Image (cartoon, rainbow, N blue to C red):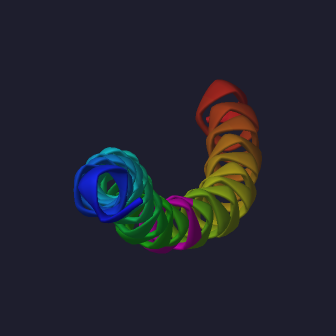
Amino acid sequence: MDNWITPAIGMFLIGQVGATVWWASGTDTKVENNTTAIEKVVQNEKEIAVIEVQQKQIQSDVDSIQKETVEMKKMMHEILIMLKSSDFTTASE
């Protein structure tokens, strides 16, 4: 009986070590994949934050342009009124 126990225990231990190495390599691959995915998420969050800042600045610029456009329209209207009134004054002279 002693003749088969030692080889059986040896084979069992070799099988367990093999299974452990196989499991650990799969776990390592999963950890690497998860790490890569997390790094991509972090990079995407940084890019999204930059885009949000850019969009806020663009919106601020658009608002400024709209205000300036309204002011320019008022000035143009006033200039046209002044020109029309000066035309009448020059025409009557």
Q: Residue at x 38, y 55 (%)?
A: 12
Residue drawn at 47 percent across, 73 percent down: 49
Q: Relative to 46, is 33 above or below?
A: above
Residue toward you, 50 or 28? 28
Quadrant the N terminus occupies: bottom left
Classify residue 39 as left or right of residue 82: left
Identify the residue shown where x is 73% and y is 59%: 70
Residue 58's x, y, as percent? Answer: 50, 59
Q: Residue furthest front?
A: 1
Camera-nearest residue between 53 and 74: 53
Quadrant in which residue 56 is drawn: bottom right
Estimate the x, y position of residue 24 in percent, counting from the top left: 32, 59
Q: Residue 11, how many percent across, how many down?
A: 29, 47
19 vs 39: above or below? above
What secondary structure do most residues of the magenta stretch adopt?
A: helix
Residue plotted at (67% across, 25% down):
91
Residue closer to the observer: 79 or 75: 75
Task: Pinpoint residue 22: horizontal percent, then vertical percent.
Answer: 33, 44
Q: Is residue 93 left or right of residue 54?
A: right
Q: Is residue 57 magenta?
A: yes
Q: Which region shows up in magenta?
A: 53-58
The total number of labels drawn is 0
Kindly give the residue lying farthest to the top in the view shown: 91
Q: Nearer the viewer, residue 86 or 22?
A: 22
Tell whether position 38 is magenta: no
Q: Quadrant of residue 50?
A: bottom left
Placement of the C terminus among the 4 image quadrants: top right
